[in-house]
Image (tube, coloured by chain):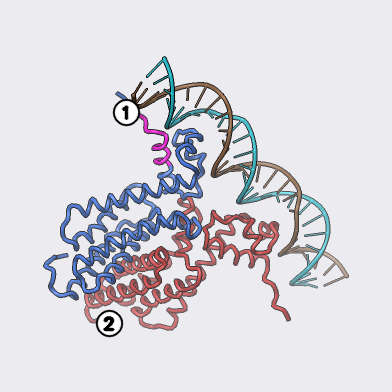
Chain colours: A blue, B red, C cyan, D brown
DNA sequence: AGCGTATCAGACAGATCTGTCTAAGATTGC
DNA sequence: GCAATCTTAGACAGATCTGTCTGATACGCT
């Protein structure tokens, strides 16, 4: 039997995700979304209160996707040092996907007024990433886990921005190498409490 | 005698710079620009062919501004190692200015179609920054100047993104510290050809 | 079968946005 | 002083964009 066609809601979400991410939220009108999704205009407003709600759903989906991808890499590891580096491996996977266009939350925020829903989505994702890295640096037992975590976040941001702006996927590898160096220096600084190797 | 009022063109550019940078290019209409600039609509299209030309002039101005600021920091130094770190000091100054909102070229590019004028402006600025750092690492005499320069660019990008996204001006300092560490490691790796201290 | 939910096609309204045009006035340089 | 350039206020056109409404139709579950 033929595979069932996804619901109008799903088609809208998928199309909105693709277009919003590639071209920006403002640049893509609902007429184009419904046309490429093959959905009636009425169905859009039946499923979403307005365009902003659709944008929010798009960002929610991206948020979920990113967390899931990172978690997939963390779940197979035990050592917190390895887990930290695995965050960069997860990013590498994302960067190599076709259509990579940088951080969707940062992109949306760049064209939205301050303090809006986009800013909230951005803050939420970044808070999660920061907390994750801080938790891992604490777990390692660094002398100053928050400083190490701050460095890691800067490296993560640099990898995201650079890989996008220069279309240079090697940036993630470079950032990962620097992260490994930061961890190695911090391990030495914290004495030999941990037998882990980086 | 009273200071002469700037020309319509200058008022337009100044207002456009402020609004485009703070709220995004798409989100700000020409009606708002001419109103806040106190300029007739006809004067806008007399001085600029269309909105896109105004956006281009805005990005050009930002490009010039950034290069000038960096150059100001470089001109007082001799040692290429110090010059590299001074790039981060120049960034620190920019980040601390009121209204800092990240990289104007990246912001504009995030809401423009790929391959457009915004992408070109972004590429131009980033090319300049990359070449600057690569030239300085060559001048230092590192064994592998391009790898060192790549790391520095990632750190620079991370500082820009992080300081904006987290409203965390300390990010530049963190990136600068990591840059100093990278340079120090690379100096050691290149032997004692250079007596410079970081 | 029948009922509620979801979807369809498309006209329509209302807002907004870029850009044009006119006709007059201000400024500047020669 | 004159001519070229710059600026003004605002009406207007044309495109686009969000969102509403109608009325018919398909689907899913009991």
**Position of residue B66 measured from the top left corner of the image (x, y, whole percent):** 48, 70
Q: How many marks?
A: 2
Q: CA distance from mark 2 to mark 1?
A: 68 Å
Q: Secondary structure at mark 1?
A: loop
What is the quadrant of the N terminus of chain B in the image?
A: bottom right
Vertical comparison of B106 with B131: above or below: above
What is the quadrant of the C terminus of chain B in the image?
A: bottom left
Query: Is B194 or A141 nearer to us in this picture?
Result: A141
Vertical comparison of A44 with A128: above or below: above
Give the residue drawn at x 39%, y 59%.
A123
Question: Mark 1 falls within which chain?
Answer: A
Q: Residue furthest left?
A: A195
User: Could you tell whether B113 is left or right of B179 in the image?
Assistant: right
**Position of residue A181 measured from the top left corner of the image (x, y, whole percent):** 22, 69
Q: Write down the quadrant of residue B123 in the picture.
A: bottom left
Query: Is B29 or A54 nearer to us in this picture?
Result: A54
Crowding near pointer 2: few (<14 within 10 Å), some, many (20+)? few
Residue under label 2? B194
Residue under label 1? A3
Q: Write down the quadrant of residue A2 in the picture.
A: top left
Crowding near pointer 1: few (<14 within 10 Å), some, many (20+)? few
Same chain? Circles 2 and 1: no
Question: Mark 2 falls within which chain?
Answer: B
Q: Secondary structure at mark 2?
A: loop
**Position of residue A145 measured from the top left corner of the image (x, y, whole percent):** 25, 70
Residue B48 tag number: none
Give the residue drawn at x 43%, y 55%.
A107
**Position of residue B27 measured from the top left corner of the image (x, y, whole percent):** 54, 55
**Range shown magenta:** A3-15
Q: Main secondary structure of the magenta part?
A: helix
């Amino acid at each position: 039997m033929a595979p069932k066609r996804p619901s109008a809601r799903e088609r809208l979400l998928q199309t909105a995700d693709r277009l919003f991410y590639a071209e920006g939220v403002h640049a893509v009108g609902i007429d184009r979304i419904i046309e490429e999704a093959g959905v009636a205009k009425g169905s859009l407003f039946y499923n979403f209160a307005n365009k902003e709600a659709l944008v929010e759903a798009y960002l929610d989906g991206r948020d979920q996707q990113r967390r899931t991808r990172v978690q997939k890499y963390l779940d197979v590891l035990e050592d917190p040092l390895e887990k930290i580096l695995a965050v960069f491996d997860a990013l590498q996977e994302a960067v190599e996907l076709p259509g990579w266009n940088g951080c969707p939350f940062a992109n949306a925020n760049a064209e939205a007024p301050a303090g809006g829903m986009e800013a909230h989505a951005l803050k939420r994702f970044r808070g999660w990433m920061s907390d994750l890295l801080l938790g891992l640096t604490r777990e390692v037992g660094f002398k100053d886990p928050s400083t190490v975590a701050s460095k890691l976040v800067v490296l993560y941001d640099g990898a995201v921005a650079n890989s996008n702006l220069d279309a240079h996927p090697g940036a993630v590898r470079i950032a990962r190498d620097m992260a490994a160096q930061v961890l190695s220096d911090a391990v030495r600084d914290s004495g030999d409490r941990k037998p882990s190797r980086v």
